């Protein structure tokens, strides 16, 4: 097991904690991480691009002019795709881009993402966040003490004071253990774990 220092909000060591090898020391495969990140991004796509087809365009269905004798090409109604303001032929319709990779692969990728942060020595374990009230300035001071600007903070349970204090700080995101995901772990430079959240991570990813 890897042993990591637990620090307080002043970046002072207060204790140590063990991180289990089957979650934080897993061999990292870029292809597995890539597959899960692409899946997450695809699931977030809106898929709302849409055009009006011939049946959706507002207009008369009357034939524009007689079939023969005018010297012009045969024409139907004003909603024809050939005419200005007519319907589109092969334009996009609303669709879902969502798909899933196997649950075991998603779980493995999450372990690999945590392991990659461990290998890069970019995991900080914090005993607790000392915030008495919702105050962005106080939160920013703690992050400065930790020498951390772009970070994902993982907490074990709802903490409204921390969540609201951090929401206006650029480059910082707060997630609970159940919302932890591969994309966000890899996106942010450092991973800040509140010490109680480690049990939640082990419970979620344990064998």
Image (spheres, rainbow, N blue to C red):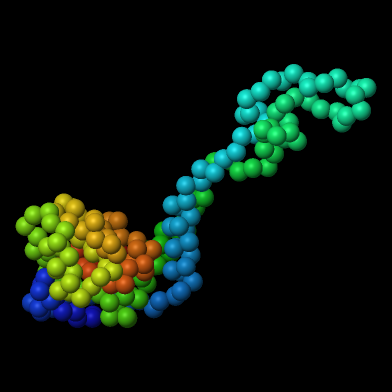
Q: In the rendered view of the protein, which quadrant contains the N terminus? A: bottom left
Using the image as rendered, state which of residue 45 and residue 206 is in the foreground: 45
Q: Is residue 17 left or right of residue 70?
A: left
Q: Residue at x 54, y 41 (%)?
A: 94
Residue 6, picture quadrant: bottom left
Q: Residue at x 44, y 52 (%)?
A: 44
Q: Where 32 sits versus 88, above or below?
A: below
Q: Where 10 sits versus 166, above or below?
A: below
The percent coordinates of residue 54 (x first, y second) are: 68, 31
Using the image as rendered, state which of residue 157 and residue 25 is in the foreground: 157
The percent coordinates of residue 41 (x first, y second) are: 45, 57
Q: Residue at x 10, y 79 (%)?
A: 13
Residue 179, picture quadrant: bottom left
Using the image as rendered, state which of residue 169 and residue 93 is in the foreground: 169
Q: Where 102 sits versus 119, above or below?
A: above
Q: Residue at x 90, y 24 (%)?
A: 70
Q: Where 35 sits versus 18, above or below?
A: above
How many badges with numbers are in the image? 0
Q: Is residue 197 left or right of residue 30?
A: left
Q: In the rendered view of the protein, which quadrant contains the C terminus? A: bottom left
The percent coordinates of residue 51 (x first, y second) are: 60, 38
Is any part of residue 177 visible from this angle?
no
The percent coordinates of residue 105 (x first, y second) are: 43, 64
Is any part of residue 144 visible from this angle?
yes
């Amino acid at each position: 097991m890897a042993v990591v220092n637990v620090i307080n909000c002043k970046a002072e060591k207060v204790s140590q904690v063990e991180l289990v090898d089957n979650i934080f020391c897993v061999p990292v495969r870029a292809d597995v991480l890539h597959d899960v990140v692409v899946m997450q991004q695809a699931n977030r796509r809106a898929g709302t691009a849409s055009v009006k087809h011939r049946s959706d365009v507002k207009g008369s269905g009357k034939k524009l002019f007689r079939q023969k004798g005018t010297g012009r090409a045969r024409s139907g109604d004003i909603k024809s795709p050939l005419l200005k303001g007519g319907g589109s032929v092969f334009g996009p319709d609303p669709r879902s881009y969502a798909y899933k990779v196997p649950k075991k692969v998603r779980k493995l990728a999450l372990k690999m993402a945590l392991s990659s942060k461990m290998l890069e020595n970019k995991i900080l374990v914090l005993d607790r966040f000392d915030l008495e009230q919702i105050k962005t300035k106080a939160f920013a001071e703690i992050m400065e003490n930790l020498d951390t600007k772009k970070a994902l903070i993982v907490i074990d349970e709802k903490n409204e004071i921390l969540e609201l204090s951090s929401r206006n700080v650029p480059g910082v995101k707060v997630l609970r253990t159940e919302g932890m995901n591969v994309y966000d772990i890899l996106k942010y430079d450092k991973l800040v774990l509140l010490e109680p959240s480690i049990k939640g991570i082990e419970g979620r990813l344990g064998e």
